[in-house]
Image (cartoon, rainbow, N blue to C red):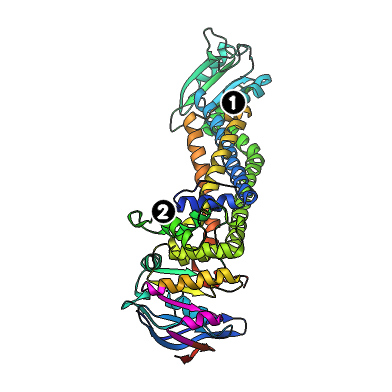
Amino acid sequence: MLRSHRHVTRVILMWQGIVRSPWRSLAGFCAAVVTAGAFLGAGALLTGMGRVLESGLERLGADLVVAPRAYRHAVERWLVEGTAPSVPTEVPGEWRHRLEERPLVGVREIVPWDLTAGGQGHPAAGKAASVLLIRLERWGQPMMVLPEVEEALPEAAVVVAEQVARRVARDLQPVVRYLAAAAGGAWVGLLLMVGVLTAVQVAERRRELGMLRAVGASRRALVALVLGEVLCLAAAGAVAGTGLALGALVLAPRELTGALAPWDYVRLALTAVGLTLATALAAATGPALRAAWMDPLAAVQQGR
Amino acid sequence: MIELRRVSKSYPTRGGRVVALAELSTTIQPGEFVVLTGRSGAGKSTLLSLASGLLKPDTGEVRIAGRNLWDMSDGERSLLRCRTMGFVFQFASLIPTLTVLENVLLPNAFLPRGERTSRQRAEEMLERVGLPGFGHRMPWQLSGGQQKRVAVARALLLRPALIFADEPTADLDAETEQVISDLLQEEHRRGCTVMLATHNRELVGLATRHLGLAEGRLVLAS
């Protein structure tokens, strides 16, 4: 095999280290792909779930919602997702009067809301409404208002937004735990895999690394060489992993990721890449330092 | 000039520390051809490592041109090694994924940009070791002896003032042994200081000074 030659630089030496053992390099690359993908996927889903909940509640700005008992479930879904199935206008105007007659502490306004078309709904035009939104002053406490409302409207269902949010968060805990465990498992896997692969790589190239020290490589240059190889593979894997995860997130249910802004994806992708690189570097530092501190001549004589 | 002053070195083993060199002192003048002999484990390789600054002595000083090697930073010491020293080992230790010429040019990677030597010089070195036109080949296409010659070309690339060689002719065919022996003599005639550990009688015959080592001590200095 004939090949043209180049000026030998440290970058070329780094590249040679990577191509030397393609399967090992591929394994390191794949570990970085999986880890970055898991970090991004878990991060996006966790952030997305929290954001959906927050945005649903924020958009409505309702602290309590009064509805006919039959529509309690629809109202809860509306609070969580910000969208609801069709709810007929069965709340009579008289309900609002009954509430307004009472001295409700901390209530800013009571708004009749129309959900006949489902979705986010709109303020009701006529006297009848699908639900009544009760908005509180900033200092108002939903749990103080709740008994008053229930007393005034015993036939109605009163849903407290805060309670719904808390319940949903509790329901999501197993999912959160699963995602965190998946990301944690990938992290530990990367740490172990990069650590072992780099240690094997350094052990196999002992003679070569000793020779590099003898021809003039400083300890810092050797550490940079070993870490540089790891960093290149981890960076390529992390970029590929985040790319794949972003592609997979397009297929995720909109309820989970719909509230994420493009900037959220950029932030999460950068975090995933950063964490992957930091993990790979941390795992490879031990073997790299061992390479730099070995006795060069003894290493070169290895196998004598 | 290389000065070793009461230099000691020991290595930890399971059975305790093993002394490789014990309070050894010697001075090697510029242009000397020093041959180290002794049995395996006598301390020859350790002495070469200490004299070249590859290994730090437990006690004592190593000075090159008046400067204590271990007063320098690792970066300074490495650069000094790259600029002024050439190493020939028992094994060729070529990088298998680089061409022969790239392997010869390897020391360039650790020199400041302005000091790097040319490809032409590397090709000249290949000619000198009897491998003209081999630059484009890969190490696995060469015999063991040819690989060793490439390693010698690499060691001599930057015209080192000091050559350290550890068993440079071990396990080689007669022709390669002769090539290496001739090259070391040529470099010595050029004014280069040569320090080599060997069991080869012919190389011992080239020495201007013969140091015999046993159990980490100098037992012969002639």
Q: Quadrant of residue B25?
A: bottom left
Inspect the magenta stretch and tell me whether residue B202 lies in it: yes
The residue at the point 44 percent across, 50 percent down is A7
Label 1 resides on the chain identified as A
Which residue type does callout 1 highlight?
Glu
Q: Position of residue B189 (x, y in %)?
A: 39, 74
Total marks placed: 2
Q: Are marks 1 and 2 on the same chain?
A: no
Which residue type does callout 2 highlight?
Gln
Q: Which residues are magenta?
A: B188-211
The residue at the point 56 percent across, 31 percent down is A53
Q: Quadrant of the C terminus of chain A?
A: bottom right
Q: Position of residue A236 (x, y in %)?
A: 54, 42
Look at the numbered disc 1 and give the secondary structure of its residue. helix
Residue indicated by mark 2: B120
Label 2 resides on the chain identified as B
- Look at the picture and state if B172 lies above or below A190: below
Q: Residue furthest top?
A: A126
Q: Position of residue B89 (x, y in %)?
A: 53, 70
